């Protein structure tokens, strides 16, 4: 068997194992710092690492020390000035704050040195999306052979060394040795018996030539036994793998954003940050998830990623146009029997007249029966409007597959995002 040992130095001469152990031990402190970093970052600055600081008192570890051991007697000197329980004044120093250091004093309370280190981009995103998932993701029936998994399908005589089956190979080698040695052992046993019989004869009747012939035969047979190889290339057996089609876990996320005139620039920035978090989460955590971007005012359009995040188009507000477009796209491209369907919608809740009723009817009559999960975030500091009230009726009808939250300020984005996509206990 061959062993490969990777002795390449870790990046920046750091131990990757020890670093991961450190991140796991202080996960609570790091997650708190990551949450603060997410809330203060801009839209275009979500994918870089982060500098984290942990108070030194929180990373102190217990240590073992050797004591003096055994029994010992101590004589402590007495004094005439102090009694048990007396408090001693701290010795004075050269600084203005009664300290002995060289720096200036401060009256701002106690301080503590901090341990600072930098999270890489991958480590930062790992903490950002830790414990999150797409709810109710299902394995869909086989519809194509794009997703396959190698599975064991017996053994074969041909293969690569990495797939050698040790047990079967040794079994074949043992059987071959038995088959090849059996006739040799039989002939050797007969020759040894004939030699013994010849040597037991009376010296007058012995045939020296026959004895030498038998000895030569025994030596030749013993060499033939030793020449039988322990293992031969004929004995090698390899695990045979075939590609087996797997049920698909394909999913599509519809990102629906309100860009009407009632959505101020601040509201749009909050919506974009929410969808950027969602985009990064899906790109990092899932391989077979497609994203469909829909912008709407009085009319809805499917757009690409660039236009979704950076276009400045605006207008009135008819929310049902976006839901209708989502319904049409599902009918054309994403049959529910083959895809897990998700919708994430962001709006300020302002809608045209009675269109909120149309939204509820679209959801309850067509969309919700086909969707895995629908999330709605309302970006407004004011009281909820008719759209929120109609969506509350949808949430009551589909409590497990419909979720809605309010975002007032940028600091609410990440907590709301985590609450909407947190891992379920029954997952």
Image: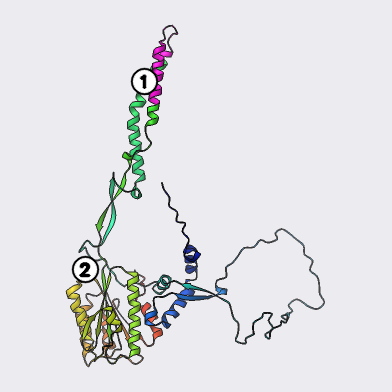
Nearer to the camera, 379 or 73: 379
Q: Is residue 250 above or below residue 353?
A: above
Nearer to the camera, 335 or 410: 410
Q: Residue at x 33, y 31 (%)?
A: 180
Q: How is the image coloured?
A: rainbow
Residue 18 disc label: none
Q: Position of residue 293 (x, y in %)?
A: 26, 79
Residue furthest to the right:
80
Residue 379 can be seen in this image: no
| 325 with respect to 218 (left or right) | left
Residue marked by disc 2:
338
Q: Is residue 332 above or below residue 320?
A: above
Q: Secondary structure at mark 1?
A: helix
Q: Position of residue 27 (x, y in %)?
A: 47, 71
Which quadrant holds residue 337?
bottom left
Q: Residue at x 37, y 80 (%)?
A: 44
Q: Which residues are magenta?
A: 197-222
For the C terminus, the quadrant is bottom left
Residue 308 can be seen in this image: yes
The residue carrying pointer 1 sits among few (fewer than 14), some (14 to 19) or many (20 or more) residues within 10 Å by Cα, namely: some
Q: Is residue 170 magenta?
A: no
Q: Give the Cα separation between the discs numbered 1 and 2.
A: 74 Å
Q: Is residue 203 magenta?
A: yes
Q: Position of residue 223 (x, y in %)?
A: 40, 27
Residue marked by disc 1:
190
């Amino acid at each position: 068997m061959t062993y490969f040992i990777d002795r390449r130095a870790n990046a920046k001469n750091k131990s990757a194992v020890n670093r991961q152990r450190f991140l796991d031990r202080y996960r609570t402190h790091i997650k708190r710092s990551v949450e603060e970093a997410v809330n203060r970052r801009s839209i275009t600055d979500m994918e870089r690492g982060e500098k984290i600081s942990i108070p030194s008192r929180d990373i102190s570890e217990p240590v073992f020390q050797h004591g003096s051991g055994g029994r010992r007697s101590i004589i402590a000197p007495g004094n005439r000035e102090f009694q048990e329980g007396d408090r001693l004044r701290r010795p004075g120093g050269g600084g203005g704050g009664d300290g002995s250091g060289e720096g200036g004093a401060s009256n701002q309370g106690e301080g503590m040195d901090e341990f600072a280190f930098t999270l890489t981009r991958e480590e930062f995103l790992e903490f950002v999306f830790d414990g999150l998932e797409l709810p109710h993701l299902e394995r869909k029936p086989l519809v194509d052979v794009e997703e396959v998994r190698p599975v064991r399908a017996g053994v074969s005589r041909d293969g690569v060394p990495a797939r050698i089956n040790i047990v079967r190979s040794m079994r074949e080698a043992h059987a071959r040795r038995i088959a090849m040695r059996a006739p040799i052992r039989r002939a050797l046993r007969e020759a040894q018996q004939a030699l013994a019989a010849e040597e037991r004869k009376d010296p007058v009747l012995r045939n020296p030539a026959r004895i030498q012939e038998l000895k030569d035969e025994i030596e030749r047979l013993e060499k033939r036994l030793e020449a039988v190889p322990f293992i031969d290339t004929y004995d090698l057996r390899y695990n045979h793998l075939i590609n087996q089609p797997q049920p698909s876990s394909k999913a599509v996320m519809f990102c629906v954003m309100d860009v009407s005139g009632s959505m101020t620039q601040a509201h749009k920035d909050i919506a974009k940050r929410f969808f950027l978090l969602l985009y990064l989460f899906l790109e990092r955590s899932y391989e077979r998830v497609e994203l469909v971007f829909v912008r709407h005012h009085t009319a809805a359009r499917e757009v690409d990623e660039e236009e979704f995040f950076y276009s400045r188009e605006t207008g009135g507000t008819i929310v049902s146009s976006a839901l209708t477009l989502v319904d049409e796209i599902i009918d054309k491209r994403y049959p529910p029997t083959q895809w897990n369907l998700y919708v994430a919608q962001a709006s300020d809740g302002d809608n045209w007249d009675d269109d909120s009723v149309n939204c509820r009817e679209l959801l309850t009559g067509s969309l919700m029966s086909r969707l895995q999960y629908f999330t709605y975030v309302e970006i407004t500091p004011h009281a909820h409007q008719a759209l929120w009230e109609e969506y509350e009726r949808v949430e009551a009808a589909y409590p497990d597959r419909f979720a809605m939250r309010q975002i007032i300020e940028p600091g609410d984005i990440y907590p709301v995002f985590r609450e909407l996509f947190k891992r379920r206990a029954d997952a």
